[in-house]
C-alpha cells in the first residue's frame, strides 16, 4: 500500500468511475496520507480548476494534491485544458496514450517527442507508464531524458496488473534509472476504487532491479511532498528564466 498515490483519475476523466469525495473517503479508509487527483486533458478542465481553487488541500486527514495527466502528442505537443494553468497545479503528469498519436510510432520517434515535450514544458513532473504498449520508450531513453529534465519516471501498478506494461520492460527501465540517477514514482493509476493506493506488482520491482531507495520519491508521504515542493521550486526558477521581468505567468508554454 502506498502512502502517497500521485496518479488517480476521478469522474472528470471520462474513464474514471468515482467522485473526488469517494476517492478521498477511500483514501482515508486505507490510510493513504497523500492523494493526487490527476485527470486527463480531455475537455476544458473546469473540474480541475474548481478543485484547485475552491476545495481545501487537506480533507479529513488526507492531503489532496491537484494535477493533470497530459497526453504527449505527435511532435511532443501537449494539449492543455483551457480552464487550467499548469503553474497553478501541484503535480503534472504526462505520458503516451492513443490520443494524438499514430499506432506504430517507433522508439526513436517516441524519444524525440518526449525530449521535445520536456524541453517545451517545464511544468511536467512525472512521465507516466514509460514502457506502455503500443508506445514503449526504450528504457535507456526514458531514464536519460527524465534525469536530464529532473522529472521522475513512473512505475504504474495498473499497467502491470492489466498487462499494458511488461514486467521485464519495467525492470529494464528501473535498472536504467539506477544508472542515470533518475527519480522514480510508484503510482496506482486508479480508475476504479479497488485500485487506489495499490502497489503489489510495482513496488517489488524496485528492489529486484537494485534501485537505490533514495531515488523512490514517494516512498513516504513526507518524501512525496518534498518531491512536489522541489519540483515547484524548479518550475518557479524556469519561469523566472523564461519570462521577462514583470510579465504575468501564463503556464501555457
Ligand atoms: Zn496514462
Ligand atoms: Zn492515468
Image (spheres, helix red, strand yellow):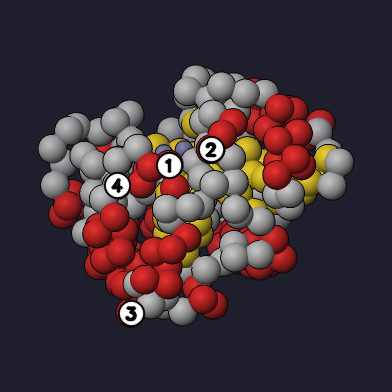
Write down the residue under mark 4. Answer: 165
Q: Nearer the viewer, residue 61 or 95?
A: 61
Relative image position of residue 108 (x, y in whole percent): 16, 54
Q: Earlier in the sequence, mark 4 or mark 1?
A: 1
Relative image position of residue 59 (x, y in whole percent): 83, 40
Q: Residues within 10 Å of mark 3 (few under 14, many from 20)?
A: some
Position of residue 64 relative to residue 15, above or below, is: below
Write down the residue under mark 1. Answer: 158
For the residues labelled 4 and 3, the Cα–Cα distance comes to 21 Å
Q: Earlier in the sequence, mark 3 or mark 1?
A: 1
Q: Of discs 3 and 2, which sits in the foreground?
A: 2
Tags 4 and 3 touching, CB below 8 Å: no
Mark 4 sits near ligand 1, with its Cβ under 8 Å away: no
Q: Of discs 3 and 1, which sits in the foreground?
A: 1
Q: Earlier in the sequence, mark 1 or mark 2?
A: 1
Relative image position of residue 115 (x, y in whole percent): 31, 57
For the residues labelled 3 and 1, the Cα–Cα distance comes to 25 Å
Q: Residues within 10 Å of mark 4 (few under 14, many from 20)?
A: many
For the residues labelled 3 and 2, the Cα–Cα distance comes to 31 Å
Q: Residues within 10 Å of mark 1 (few under 14, many from 20)?
A: many
Q: Residue at x 86, y 41 (%)?
A: 60
- Name the secondary structure under disc 2: helix
Report whether residue 9 is seen: no
Q: Quadrant of residue 196?
A: top right
Report whether residue 98 is seen: yes
Q: Nearer the viewer, residue 8 or 112?
A: 8
Tags 3 and 2 touching, CB below 8 Å: no
Q: Of discs 4 and 3, which sits in the foreground?
A: 4
Write down the residue under mark 3. Answer: 179
Mark 2 sits near ligand 2, with its Cβ under 8 Å away: no
Q: Is residue 194 left or right of residue 180?
A: right
Amino acid at each position: 500500500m502506498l502512502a502517497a498515490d500521485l496518479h488517480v483519475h476521478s469522474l472528470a476523466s471520462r474513464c474514471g468511475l468515482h467522485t473526488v469525495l469517494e476517492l478521498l473517503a477511500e483514501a482515508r479508509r486505507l490510510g493513504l496520507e497523500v492523494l493526487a487527483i490527476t485527470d486527463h486533458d480531455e475537455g476544458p478542465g473546469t473540474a480541475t480548476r474548481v478543485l484547485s481553487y475552491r476545495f481545501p488541500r487537506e480533507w479529513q486527514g488526507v492531503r489532496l494534491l491537484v494535477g493533470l495527466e497530459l497526453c504527449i502528442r505527435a511532435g511532443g505537443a501537449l494539449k492543455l485544458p483551457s480552464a487550467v494553468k499548469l503553474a497553478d497545479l501541484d503535480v503534472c503528469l504526462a505520458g503516451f496514450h492513443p490520443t494524438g498519436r499514430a499506432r506504430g510510432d517507433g522508439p526513436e520517434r517516441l524519444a524525440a517527442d518526449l525530449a521535445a515535450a520536456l524541453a517545451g514544458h517545464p511544468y511536467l513532473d512525472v512521465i507516466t507508464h514509460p514502457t506502455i504498449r503500443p508506445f514503449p520508450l526504450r528504457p535507456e531513453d526514458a531514464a536519460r531524458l527524465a534525469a536530464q529534465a529532473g522529472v521522475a519516471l513512473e512505475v504504474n501498478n495498473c499497467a502491470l496488473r492489466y498487462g499494458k506494461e511488461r514486467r521485464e520492460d519495467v525492470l529494464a527501465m528501473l535498472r536504467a534509472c539506477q544508472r542515470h540517477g533518475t527519480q522514480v514514482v510508484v503510482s496506482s493509476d486508479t480508475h476504479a476504487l479497488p485500485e487506489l493506493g495499490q502497489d503489489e506488482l510495482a513496488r517489488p520491482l524496485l528492489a529486484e532491479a537494485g534501485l537505490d531507495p533514495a531515488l523512490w520519491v514517494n516512498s513516504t508521504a513526507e518524501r512525496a511532498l518534498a518531491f512536489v515542493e522541489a519540483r515547484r521550486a524548479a518550475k518557479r526558477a524556469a519561469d523566472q528564466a523564461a519570462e521577462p521581468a514583470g510579465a504575468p505567468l501564463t503556464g501555457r508554454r
